[in-house]
Image (tube, grey):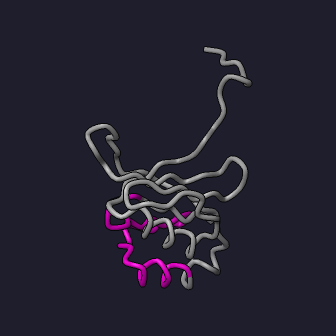
Amino acid sequence: MDLDKDSLSFYGASLKADDCAMIARLYSELFGGEVQVSSPGHAELLFSENQRVIFSKETEECPVSPGTLVWKISKTRVPAFETKLLGAGFEKELTTSKYSSYLDRWKNRIWLYW
């Protein structure tokens, strides 16, 4: 299927939350980015013109499944950043020779890839 580039563009990745304003602030503190929209039911965090993370509270009109974000990081910086993640309530899921993964309380996954 060939899509016209002008008719379709990437908008953002979506994650599940109960308090979208709170998690948008948390992810902004951890990863940078600017909170563009913030309410308990919907929030948007912009990292650049086309790199957006959307947090949504699940409702009948808006079914939301947990999602995954992948971040590239220097292997030497992983221990310090892992400490920040664990301190913010993330749970370490696993570690391999190339990445580690963490779950927030809504089961959204963060991959740290080096």
The part of the image, by quadrant, that contains residue 5 is top right
Seen in the picture, residue 67 relative to 3 is either above or below; the reply is below
Q: Which residues are magenta?
A: 81-108
Front residue of 25 and 90: 25
Front residue of 107 and 92: 107
Where is residue 22 shown, x and y percent of the image?
42, 70
The part of the image, by quadrant, that contains residue 16 is bottom left
Q: How many marks?
A: 0
Direction from residue 47 to residue 112 in the image, left or right? left
Residue at 49% in and 61% down: 38
Where is residue 104 shown, x and y percent of the image?
37, 67
Direction from residue 61 to residue 7 in the image, left or right? right
Where is residue 105 shown, x and y percent of the image?
32, 67
Where is residue 15 shown, x and y percent of the image?
43, 53
Extreme-top residue of the structure = 1
Extreme-left residue of the structure = 60
The part of the image, by quadrant, that contains residue 39 is bottom left
Residue at 36% in and 51% down: 66
Direction from residue 33 to residue 69 in the image, left or right? left
